[in-house]
Every structure is written in C-alpha cells, then in structure tokens.
Amino acid sequence: MSLSPERSDSTDNDDGKNGGAANLPDDQVFELLTRVPLDDLAACRVASPRWRSITYEPAFAPLHCRRATAVSGYFVQSMQRNRYRADFVSMHTSPPKAAVSLDFLPSAHVRLEAVAAHRGLACCVEADTRRRPCYYVCKPATRQWRALPNPRARFPTAATAMVARPSAAAAEFKIVRLSIPALHDRLRCEVFDSRRFAWRRAADVPLCPESLYPSAPAVRAHGGMHWLRWPDRTGAQDVFAFDLRSEVWRLIRLPREVEERDDPWARKHISAVEGRLCLMVTTMGVGEVDTLEVWEMAGYAEGRWEKKMTVSLKSLHAQEGDGVILQHLHSADVGFFKTFYRVMWYDFLRGKKAAEVKVDHVCVQEIFKFESDLIPCELGGKARAPSEEVQKGDYMF
C-alpha cells in the first residue's frame, strides 16, 4: 500500500563504488539525517534515493523535529463570526519555544493565503473589508513579519502560491497571485519577487476563472504548483499546474478511469506524497461504504497516473462517524482528516488513529501543510533600481 518514492534525476551513489557516506548502514544514515537542518533535507533527498527513502520513514519526522529544532504540521483555517482564524496543529512533539501562530501580525484579522515549502514562510492578507487590504510575508515560527506592496487588489483573488529558496542567507521568495478581471474571461497573473520587492504583471492564463475559484491551497510537487479545477462548462475536471520559475502553465487530465466514472458525489482532492502529485478519490461503495482510491503521478511529463491503493473507510466511519473528511495525505499510509472541532491523522494500514488534536473550529475550510526551522531570517531584499531588475527565469529554486 505504500507509495513509491519520487524518482531522482541525479545519479544514485549508494552502490558502494564511491565510498564515504554511501557505505554507511541505514541506521547510521538515519542518525545523521535526523540532525540535518530542515531546508538541507531537500538536497539530501536529491543526492541519494536511499537517503530519500530514509527521510520518509514514519519514525524520521518526529525525531528530526526534536533534533533539528523544527516544527511540522498544518495550519487549519476557517471563518468564525466573519473573522478568519488559522491555528497550527501537529502530531509531533514541538521543541521548546516553538508555539506557532499568526497572532503577532499587526492586524487582528488576516487570511492565510499561501505557505512556502522552504524557510517556513507564509503569505497573509488583511481581511477586513472596510479597509484597504495589506499583504504580509511572515515566518510564524520566529514571529517575524514584513509588509508587502499591494498587487491589484481590486481584482478578486482566485489562487495564490508561494515558493522560497532553501538555505539562502536571506529569505528569498516568490509569490504568484491569480485574480479575476472584470470580464471574467481569463486569469490575471501577477508575480512578486523578493529580490526586487515588487509585483510585476505576468502573462495572463486563458482559462475560465470560475473553474479555479474558490480554490484550495496550492499543492507543490514536481517543481510546480497545482490546483484541482472545478468542472468546466463541459463537465470535465483536471489539474492546473503552474511553474513559478518558468511561469509556464499546463493542464493535467485526471486518470481515465476516474474521468469515465459517472459519480457526481465522488469527492476529489490532490496532495503530495514524497514529492509526487497524488489524487484522492472518495466514492460511495456498495452498502453506502466510502472507498478511498489513491492515484500517484507516475510520469509527470506525459501526465501518467497509476493507482497505488484502494482503502475501505468503513472502519474509520464506524469509529468516528460519517462527518470525517479526508483533506490531505500526510504520508503514504496516513491521511489527514477534519471533522467538527477535531483534526486527526488516520493510519490506513493499521486501521486506527495515529493522532488527534482538538481545535476551536466548527468546520475547517482550508489546510496548509507547514514546516519550519526556528532560525530568524531577513524577510526579503532591498528594493532595486529599475536597471537592477531581476529577469524572469534567473530565480533558481
């Protein structure tokens, strides 16, 4: 039932020919990697498929959080009494002084828009409609923030995504904002670059805005950002992919078996497991028992999916009721579920909860996967003169 690790384009040096760390037994490599700083894990996973596999073992994450002084979990966001609220939840024991929240921001009413996979950065926006919106970049784990110049806020936001450069001296990041113009005939695209500390207009995306709005948070996999689109006028549904480095977009069809299934009640979500895009489809089975299918992106260039597992949720519903809804794949065999005033991690293999956290949310609306170290950093560079403007495509992540 486990999902296979993402294939790496780098050479596998674990065959013992190159000596050094490649010859260490797995338990010693495990001990070393649990002490690697959070953002350096990305380089370790690319360096060796064996190392990559070790970093995704169930015992790795909680030990790494303690030893590398990091936090890992989710921001869960909802609206209560016309005010947004985002709380951080985790199944791992947090290190000392690691209380993570957004209560340090200058506004008491902000909406979390996007998080970056590296550096523990988040993009938030002032949500008080009586005032002009203000955008912020922040690092919740160190309670740092900085105001950003506003994009064209008069156009409603359809989707937002954020990426950051790992292990840089300063926190360098990009934000893409897709908005809905007055004619509703395309997606208007703006990109914020921290090295210029300014927004610029990028090429519009000729897609129906309503197919993306309102959208769930972006899913980062295969170097791009992904959103599951709502069915368009033809009834078709697909995944919208946007590469922030090249600013190129594409549409990825769902598996043919899913497309051909005539089930208007099927619930679909996308997630990322071990760097690979995954599609989760929950369908009503015989006897009204929900069944979860997990499809993995086996060939990203050609958009080829493979079904990785099928799981009955009968045991889960018998234990927790029918109100639990799958939101994310925490790992290959563990799902992250929401329900009234609770979120939980459920182990599909063992058929039981791995962890549960009570929250003050009647109904969670959005979840953002969040990881961060506890190292303060400079949030963005100084504004550059027009002659020093950073060119598109020279921002390597």
Image: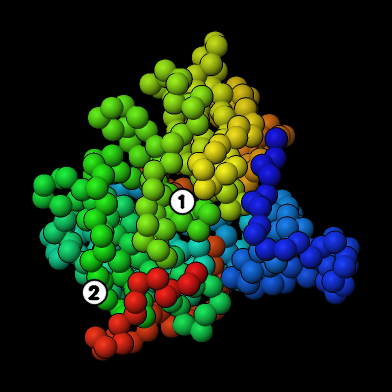
Position of residue 378 relative to residue 76, above or below, is below
Query: What's the residue at 53%, 47% (across, down)?
Result: 300
Q: As drawn, which residue projects farthest toward the front?
A: 302
Query: What's the residue at 16%, 56% (across, down)?
Result: 155
Q: Residue under label 1, please give it.
A: 219
Q: In terms of sequence position, does the residue under pointer 1 or pointer 2 come before the other?
A: 2
The amino acid type, in three-letter code, at marker 2 is: Pro
Gap between marks 1 and 2 measured at Cα: 25 Å
Q: Left or right of 251: which side holds 130?
A: left
Q: Is residue 88 visible?
A: yes
Q: Can you give x and y, in whole percent of width and height, for residue 343 in the image?
A: 51, 43
Task: Check if mark 1's residue and mark 2's residue have beta carbons within 8 Å.
Answer: no
Residue 381 lies in quadrant: bottom left
The amino acid type, in three-letter code, at marker 1 is: Val
- Secondary structure found at label 1: strand
Q: As drawn, which residue projects farthest toward the top?
A: 287
Residue 185 lies in quadrant: top left
Position of residue 85 relative to residue 348, above or below, is below
Q: Can residue 41 be seen in this view?
A: no
The residue carrying pointer 1 sits among few (fewer than 14), some (14 to 19) or many (20 or more) residues within 10 Å by Cα, namely many
Query: What's the residue at 44%, 26% (across, down)?
Result: 259
Q: Can you give x and y, in whole percent of width and height, for residue 66 in the image?
A: 68, 67
Query: What's the residue at 50%, 62% (across, down)?
Result: 117
Q: Left or right of 292: which side holds 197?
A: left
Q: Residue under label 2, please give it.
A: 149
Q: Quadrant of the N terminus?
A: top right
What label sits on residue 43 in the rendered view? none
Q: Can you give x and y, in whole percent of width and height, for residue 145 in the image?
A: 37, 75
Q: Between 325 and 18, which is closer to the camera in this rendering?
A: 18
- Secondary structure found at label 2: loop
The residue carrying pointer 2 sits among few (fewer than 14), some (14 to 19) or many (20 or more) residues within 10 Å by Cα, namely few
